[in-house]
Image: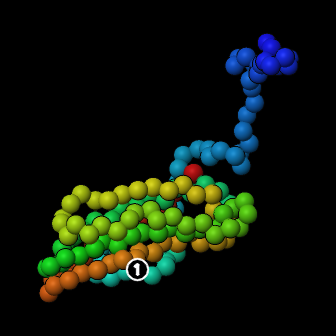
Amino acid sequence: MACNGDSTTLVKAFSELTGSATGTQLPSGTPTQLAIVNLTSQGANISTSTLYTPATTGFFRVTASLKRTQIGTTSSTLPSLTIAWTEGDNSAAGSNVLIATNATNTLVATIASQQVVWAKAATAITYATAGYASVGATPMQYALRIKCEGL
């Protein structure tokens, strides 16, 4: 094949591409449940709390749901949920707002999300909520459920 006068070799045929990933590159086996958080009747933000501290560096899946269980009399904002960890490759701080705030003040379906992280051994995977607000005599309440699995 010629391209602009240069000779170019094509990549090998798909059938010739072989190889395998090492155990540190891809998850293997069945996910293992490592930690569960099941908090109900929450009426404030939750400060940074440990979800799980890995014994070895690896992949971990965090699945979470937030649900308003009681609306505020006038208005309310369901808080956001942030997951944080230390990266297993370079020890950099990692974090993600897994669930954003929600100000609908209605009892609607659960808001849920997942995050897969490559977390460093002996450093905590944490969670925290922020942005809770409630106006009126009856305060908004919510349930927070989180599961951490080793992959």
Per the image, label 1 sits on a secondary structure element best described as: loop
Residue extending farthest top: 1
Depth check: give the residue in front, 61 or 101: 101
Residue extending farthest front: 4
Depth check: give the residue in front, 133 or 26: 133
Q: On the rendered structure, is 105 left or right of 56?
A: left
Residue extending farthest bottom: 137
Residue at 74%, 26% (x, y): give it: 18
Q: Position of residue 91 (x, y in %)?
A: 71, 67
Q: Is residue 28 above or below residue 120?
A: above
Q: On the rendered structure, is 51 left or right of 54?
A: left
Q: Which image quarter is the N terminus in?
A: top right
Q: Amino acid at mark 1?
A: Ile
- Residue 56 in sight in this render: no
Image quadrant in which you'd find residue 38? bottom left
Which residue is labeled 1 in the image?
Answer: 46
Residue at 19%, 76% (x, y): give it: 75
Q: Position of residue 116 (x, y in %)?
A: 54, 55
Q: Position of residue 26 (x, y in %)?
A: 65, 44
Q: Is residue 114 above or below residue 73?
A: above
Q: Is residue 58 above or below residue 121?
A: above
Residue at 75%, 30% (x, y): give it: 19
Depth check: give the residue in front, 53 or 77: 77
- Residue 128 in sight in this render: yes
Q: Position of residue 70 (x, y in %)?
A: 19, 73
Residue at 62%, 44% (x, y): give it: 28
